[in-house]
Amino acid sequence: MSSIKELFGINFNYLYETIAVTLAKLEKEKKIIPNSACMGVKFLDNNTFQMTPYLETDTYKNLIKSPYVSINFVDNIYFYALAALLGENSGHTEREFPDSYYDSKDEIPYLKESWGVIFGELDEHKIITKATHLGENNVLQANFKFFDFIKRRESFHLKNRAENLALESIILTTRLRIAIKKENREMYEKIYDRILYYREQIDQFSKNKNALKTMNFIMEYIDKNINILKK
């Protein structure tokens, strides 16, 4: 089998933003559904990649029950917003993507939208404490063995500044939830102000419809679900 580096042009020990799809077991409904999440992935060598999901996330909970994951490379920035902000294993919230958006290989789901997919099985893993500007949090440092792939096409898409700001806004929105959990209003306001600044930059300097659509979705999501400033 060709190496990951040859197949996808990946550099080792670089962090890549991807959409990770794991298997969610809904106990109440007694069924298994795909769960998608925005996830940074680091490729350590030709056989191993690493993710560090927070212990509060569905991705962590899913991996403890089923050790398989598909790493999806997707060009559409709007998909990252849906994966990061929608869906919970409870089954009572809006899912990230409908079933029609998924296909599967050896019963492991992946996104049809992806231009490339890497499949892995959980290998060595441990819980570590990760220090960020939001404080210390426990994460699962999880190494996966790469065992299969799908590559539909070459991706020549290079994210422009507007899309990079939209992606950063997606990540910051997930941090707002952490600020709420910590009951840290000052942290929340700083993060929220940064998101507003990125939105202003995109509105002012970009005609990128996909980035604008993503930012509108983010702002609507915050206002509806996690806006503590209007209370």
Image (cartoon, rainbow, N blue to C red):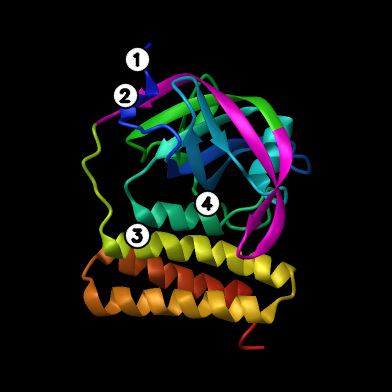
Separation of marks 2 and 3 at Cα, in angstroms: 24 Å
Amino acid type for the residue under numbered disc 1? Ser
Q: Are marks 3 and 1 in contact (CB under 8 Å)?
A: no
Amino acid type for the residue under numbered disc 4? Glu
How packed mark 2 is, by other alpha carbons closer than 10 Å (few <14, some 14-19, many 20 or more), is: some
Q: Are marks 1 and 2 in contact (CB under 8 Å)?
A: yes
Residue under numbered circle 1 = 2
Residue beneath the point at 38% across and 64% down: 166
Residue under numbered circle 4 = 96
In the depicted structure, whether residue 80 falls above or below residue 175: above
Q: Quadrant of the N terminus?
A: top left
In this image, 87 relative to 136: left or right? left
Q: Secondary structure at mark 4?
A: loop
On whether residue 151 falls in the magenta region, the answer is: yes
Residue under numbered circle 2 = 7
Amino acid type for the residue under numbered disc 2? Leu
In this image, 156 relative to 170: left or right? left
Residue under numbered circle 3 = 164
Residue beneath the point at 23% across and 75% down: 205
Separation of marks 4 and 2 at Cα, in angstroms: 28 Å
